[in-house]
Amino acid sequence: MVASPTIPLEVLIRRMMPVSATPDQRKDIDALLKALEGKAHKRNIKRTRPHYRLLGPQGESVPLPDTVFIVLERVAEVLARGDAISIVPVGKELTTQQAADLLTISRQYLVRLLNAGLIPCARTGKHRRLRIEDVLEYKRKRDRERKATLSELTRLSEDSGGYDELK
């Protein structure tokens, strides 16, 4: 999702909503990725600890730790492919709305999943909180089950002679 006039990009990122690059940003992201990959390649060859710096709008220079550089490199890689990305801190507790947004389901459906015990949650007063790890594990399990079901449907369709026009 790209920021809209009603929802600024910073808000989307803080809400852990997926963001993607606009078509006009893709060229700059491709150039950034090439520059970062070049530095990463040189870093591996030299086996020395490089020193990266981030240049601010007023010309100020701030050291860029290796961990931030590696994350930046991965973010540029994902955006350059045209995919969306979310940044979620490990150990983060989510509201039911944040978890529903992450799973791309309605909050009401998520509450049904919680009531059925399919995703663990904790209560803080009247509100439920979910650990990001639990939500992502449910998502991985759901995705595996969907893929297996689609594979089985494809196999059944092929076995019954369906989709002759594709042969």
Image (cartoon, rainbow, N blue to C red):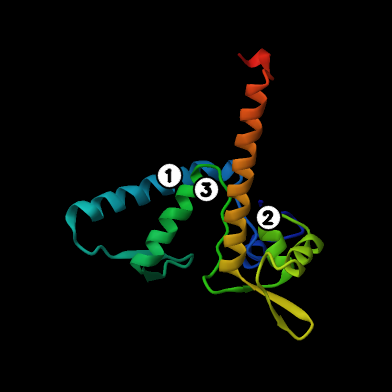
Residue 39 vs 64, above or below: the answer is above
Q: Residue 147's quadrant in the figure? A: top right
Q: Of callouts 2 and 3, which one flags the residue occurring earlier in the amino acid sequence?
A: 2
Residue 10: percent from left, percent from top: 63, 64
Horizontal side of residue 68 vs 5, given as left or right: left
SS for callout 3: helix
Residue corresponding to mark 2? 3
Q: Amino acid at mark 3?
A: Leu
Residue corresponding to mark 3? 79
Residue 149 vs 6, above or below: the answer is above
Horizontal side of residue 126 vs 134, given as left or right: right
Mark 3–mark 1 distance (CA, rounded to whole Å): 12 Å
Horizontal side of residue 154 vs 125, given as left or right: left
In the rendering, which numbered label is found on residue 125? none
Toward the bottom, the furthest residue is: 125
Q: Residue at x 23, y 54 (%)?
A: 44
Quarter of the picture containing the C terminus is top right
Q: Residue at x 79, y 82 (%)?
A: 126
Q: Residue at x 63, y 23 (%)?
A: 158
Mark 2–mark 1 distance (CA, rounded to whole Å): 22 Å
Mark 2–mark 3 distance (CA, rounded to whole Å): 14 Å
Residue 14: percent from left, percent from top: 63, 68
Q: How many marks?
A: 3
Q: Amino acid at mark 2?
A: Ala
**Front disc: 2 or 3:** 3
Crowding at label 2, few (<14), some or many (≥20) Cα neighbours within 10 Å? some
Q: Quick check: marks 2 and 1 in contact, CB under 8 Å?
A: no
SS for callout 1: helix
Residue corresponding to mark 1? 31
Toward the right, the furthest residue is: 108
Q: Quick check: marks 2 and 3 in contact, CB under 8 Å?
A: no
